[in-house]
Image: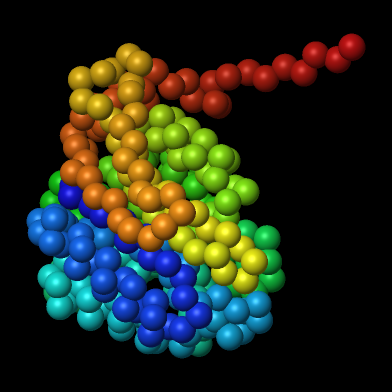
Amino acid sequence: MRVACIQPELFEQRKDCYYEIERILNEILEIHNNCEVICLPERWVPFFRDPTKNFQEERGNDYFFIKNLAKEYTIKFLSGAIWEKRTSSEKPAITCYFFNENGEEIGRQDKIHLYAYEREHFEPGKELKVFNLDRSRYFTILICFDMAFIDTPRLAVESGADLLFSPTQIRDDGMDNWEIYLKARALENRIPIVACNTFGNYKKRNFLGNSKIISFYKGSISPSKLKIVEGPKGSSGFIFDNIDLNFPKKLREIRFKEKIDKNDIEVKVIKT
C-alpha cells in the first residue's frame, strides 16, 4: 500500500492551515504521483483553550475541505481528527473520516479512549471499524490514545485489519513513550502502523512532528525486523512509503499460532 502522512504546521488562522495542507499535498504528488492513501494528524487546525471554540458542526467546513481534496486530487484521504457536534449525542465526538478517491465518505471512526480533559468534553466512541480498501486489504483507524492500550490494536488485527492508521497529537515530552507504543504494537501484532503527528509551537505546547511509518523488512522472520520511515522532526513536511502487507500477514499467522490464550493460563497468587 502506497501511503503518505502530511505533517503540517499549526497556524492561528484556519485558512492558513488549509493552505499548508494543500501545499504539502502538492509536494507529495510531485514526487509520488501514485500515492493511494494520505493521512492527516489528529490536530491540524487552530487550537483554542476554550474547547467550545474548537467544535464544528457535524460534517462542517473541515470535513468538506478534506472531502474536496480527495475528489480534486483523486486520492483517498483520512481526515485526521475533527471535533464535531452531533444531534445524536449530548457531547461532541472526536472523529476521523475516510474518503475514497472520488471524494465519497466511506465511513468514520470515533476516538474510543479519550485523553485527560477530553473525557469531560467529548463522547467516547463505542465501535471499532475495519475499513475495506479493496477486495484484499483492510485497515483500522486508531486515534492517538487508542494506540496506548493493548486491546484496541489487537481487536483490530483479530478482526482482519492489515494496517493501522493513527492520527496523533503528541507533545515533545511524550515522544519517547509514543515511539515505544508504536514499536510495541507493531511487534505484538506483526502489523504495519502509519502514525501521523502534529507539528508546531502553539499555545505553549510544542509539537515536534516526526511522523512514522513502521513496517517490516521482508524475509526476516525470527527475529522480525522493523522498518521505520520518519518524518521531519521540528519542521513541517511529509513521509511516504510503499508498505508490503503480505509479508506481515505471514508473520501474524506465525505469531498468533504461538500465542497461548489467557483463559488457558492458571494464575496463582503466592502470599508470604
Image point (56%, 40%), residue name: 176
**Farthest right residue?**
272
Numbered disc total: 0
Does any portion of residue 71 appear in the rendered image? yes
**Farthest left residue?**
34
On screen, 152 above or below 258?
below
Asked if residue 170 lies left or right of residue 188, the reply is: right
Image point (20%, 60%), residue name: 28
Image point (38%, 50%), residue name: 232
Colour approach in the figure: rainbow
Q: Where in the figure is residue 174, as x and y percent of width and height? A: 59, 48
Asked if residue 202 lies left or right of residue 185, the reply is: right
Q: Quadrant of residue 44?
A: bottom left
Residue nearest the viewer, comparing 84 with 202: 202
On screen, 196 above or below 85?
above
Residue nearest the viewer, comparing 226 with 118: 226
Does any portion of residue 58 appear in the rendered image? no
Q: Where in the figure is residue 264, as x and y percent of width and height? A: 54, 21
Q: Quadrant of residue 148?
A: top right
Image point (55%, 45%), residue name: 175
**Farthest front residue?**
235
Q: Where in the figure is residue 23, as x and y percent of width and height? A: 26, 71
On screen, 91 above or below 192?
below
Residue nearest the viewer, comparing 55 with 236: 236
Q: Where in the figure is residue 13, as x and y percent of width and height? A: 46, 84
Residue nearest the viewer, comparing 43 with 247: 43
Q: Quadrant of the C terminus?
A: top right
